[in-house]
Image (cartoon, rainbow, N blue to C red):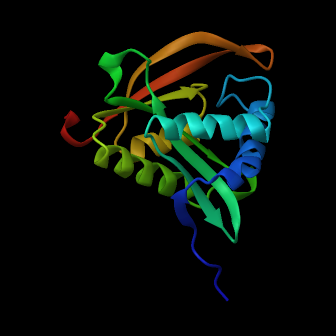
Amino acid sequence: MKPAPPVIRAARDADAPEIAAIYGYYVRTALATFETDPPDAAEMLHRLHLVADRGLPCLVAELEGCVAGYAYAAPYRPRPAYRFTVENSVYVHPDRQRMGLGRLLLTELIAVCEAAGSRQMVAVIGDSANVASIGLHEALGFRRVGVLLNVGFKSGRWVDTVLMQRPLGDGR
């Protein structure tokens, strides 16, 4: 029997422990985030509420009753002139990679942000060698707009960030 397809839906408070576990993996093992101490479920719940309080989306990919990945949009910068620009983040459970979940999440995140009136989406990708994330963003219409060299120090080495941008709706 074929497994049920993933469901992309809004994150709920009850998802915080699974979201924290997914993000914690990347904090501990990868350069995709420059955070160095994994936040616990209570902190992730607080972050989910901050996103929701700003009217921005946080989505999860649910697969077989479990959160297999998540994505959210956050303000790009706090000053009012940036209010129509969002920054995206996408994380997929390490055991659920290469299943198209990142693409599904980011596609829906783009659609929700466009419908809400956002005009630009920015990706700040940790590590210029993060070909999976860079490739995903390129496939969904983002273009590279810059690289900040050696701006983070994690796992004993200096790490770049790749800046990518995609217009949304009338942002073209």
Q: How many marks?
A: 0
Instruction: Residue 88: tell me if it is visible.
Output: no
Q: Residue at x 77, y 32 (%)?
A: 39
60, 14: nearer the viewer: 14
Q: Quadrant of residue 36?
A: top right
> Residue 112 vs residue 58: left or right?
left
Q: Residue at x 70, y 38 (%)?
A: 44
Q: Quadrant of residue 64?
A: bottom right
Instruction: Residue 117: tell me if it is visible.
Output: yes
Quadrant position of the C terminus in the picture: top left
x and y percent of residue 14 in the render?
Answer: 70, 55
Q: Is residue 40 above or below residue 65?
A: above
Q: Residue furthest front?
A: 53
Q: Residue furthest bottom?
A: 1
x and y percent of residue 70 in the render?
Answer: 60, 49
Q: Residue at x 64, y 31 (%)?
A: 32
Quadrant position of the N terminus in the picture: bottom right
Q: Is residue 129 above or below residue 92?
A: above
159, 43: nearer the viewer: 43
Q: Residue at x 51, y 41 (%)?
A: 52
